[in-house]
């Protein structure tokens, strides 16, 4: 008996808690690098 495993690719969800300029810069940078490639939701 042969079993096949289906792998589903789930995107990672990144939530930035807090604000200020550092949070905005972090969200922008992560969105540009990981968000565009579809690897994460920021």
Image (cartoon, rainbow, N blue to C red):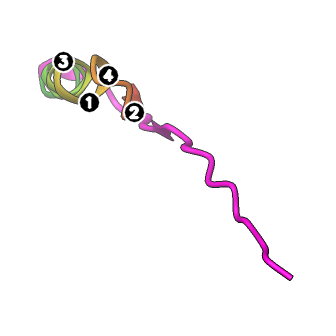
Which quarter of the picture shows residue 37? top left
Q: Position of residue 41 (x, y in %)?
A: 44, 27
Q: Looking at this view, is 23 or 32 the one in front?
A: 32
Q: Which residue is mark 1?
A: 34
Describe the element under mark 2 as helix, strand or loop: strand
Residue 12 drawn above or below residue 26: below
Q: Earlier in the sequence, mark 3 or mark 2?
A: 3
Q: Within the magenta stretch, is there residue 26?
A: no
Q: Are marks 2 and 4 in contact (CB under 8 Å)?
A: yes
Residue 8 left/right relative to 12: right
Q: Residue furthest right?
A: 1
Residue 38 left/right relative to 33: right
Q: Residues within 10 Å of mark 2 (few under 14, many from 20)?
A: some
Q: Residue at x 26, y 20 (%)?
A: 31
Residue 22 left/right relative to 36: left
Q: Earlier in the sequence, mark 2 or mark 4?
A: 4
Q: Which residue is mark 2?
A: 40
**Cα separation between marks 3 and 2:** 10 Å
Q: Residues within 10 Å of mark 4 (few under 14, many from 20)?
A: some
* Residue 32: mark: 3
Q: Are marks 1 and 2 in contact (CB under 8 Å)?
A: yes
Describe the element under mark 1 as helix, strand or loop: helix
Q: Position of residue 12 (x, y in %)?
A: 47, 41
Q: Are marks 3 and 4 in contact (CB under 8 Å)?
A: yes
């Amino acid at each position: 008996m042969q079993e096949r495993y289906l792998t589903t690719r789930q995107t990672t969800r990144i939530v930035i808690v807090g604000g200020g300029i550092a949070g905005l810069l972090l969200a922008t940078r992560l969105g540009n690098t990981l968000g565009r490639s579809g690897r994460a939701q920021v």
